Amino acid sequence: MHTSSPGYLTKQESIAVVGVDDLFIRSLLDKNQFHDPLDEALNLGISSATWPLFGLLWPSGQRMAERMALRPVSRERILEIGCGLGLASLVAHRRGATVTASDCHPLAHAFLDENTRLNGLPLITYRHGLWGRAALREDGLPVLTQAQDAAVIGLFDLIVGSDILYERDDEGALASFIDAHAAARSEIWVVDPNRGNRAAFHKHMARAGFALHEQVLDLPAHDGHEAYKGRMLTYTRG
């Protein structure tokens, strides 16, 4: 089903995640959508080319959702960073986990709320999550979206992110952001489709006290899905 919103087109479809019931997800129609009339995204360093990426379902997000479906539900606090449409967060939320979803895109919150509503669930806690130089204004204060979403605060027992190593990060901004929000005893999951920036990220995470376990996630094409190549990176501390 296709629908239109001011400035962009969306679609709604049922997404299968192994281990849980299918989820209804509203996403952008394709990667050609763009709508940033107030330059909110541009001011956060999001160009017209990268603007639609938050609103698409990606294979790495599917892999993360599948792993989240297997995670025993406990009292732990979970944070998803770069959540996009929030598929992994939705899986955890519907299973009863305490989850906070975060992203830096101005429309991520609205899409997450809509997808939560489509699945008949109470709203998921959402926070504005941005790391690196783009996260700070010239006066050193955090950048906020037009909606004034609060920034990520607090410590989390499990932090997850899919396809978040897409930019070179010599300064270790992402690892520093994770370190700032990871509990002393914590676990970090990153699904990486072999972007090529793992080595530097490993180094920065090791400096923050995290030990690494890598699992190859190469999957053949099946049931209309393209083949997938990537790795599940699990970091533990404490």
Image (cartoon, helix red, strand yellow):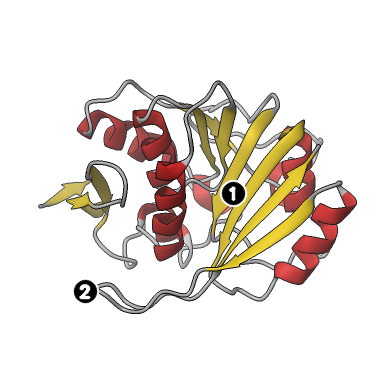
Determine the residue positioned at 22% across, 45% down: 22
Residue type at numbered disc 1: Asn
Q: Along the horizontal axis of the image, is 213 left or right of 146?
A: right
Q: Quadrant of residue 203?
A: bottom right
* Residue 140 visible in rendering: yes
As drawn, 56 above or below 109: below
**Number of marks in picture:** 2
Residue under pointer 2:
224
- Give the class, few, some or many, for how many residues have Cα within 10 Å of label 2's Cα (few <14, many ≥20): few
Residue 232 or residue 102, whichever sits in front: 232
* Residue 6 visible in rendering: no
Q: Quadrant of residue 118?
A: top left
Residue 165 in picture, x, y percent from top left: 63, 63
In what quadrant of the picture does the C terminus appear?
Answer: top right
SS type, badge 1? helix
SS type, badge 2? loop
Residue 233 in picture, x, y percent from top left: 64, 59
Residue under pointer 1:
43
Determine the residue positioned at 28% across, 25% down: 121
Residue 96 or residue 52, whichever sits in front: 96
Q: Earlier in the sequence, mark 1 or mark 2?
A: 1
Determine the residue positioned at 23% across, 33% down: 119
Residue 72 in picture, x, y percent from top left: 48, 34
Kindly indicate whether the residue at mark 2 contacts the one at mark 1 (C-beta within 8 angstroms).
Answer: no
Separation (CA) of disc 1 from disc 2: 38 Å
As drawn, 229 above or below 213: below
Determine the residue positioned at 27% across, 72% down: 225
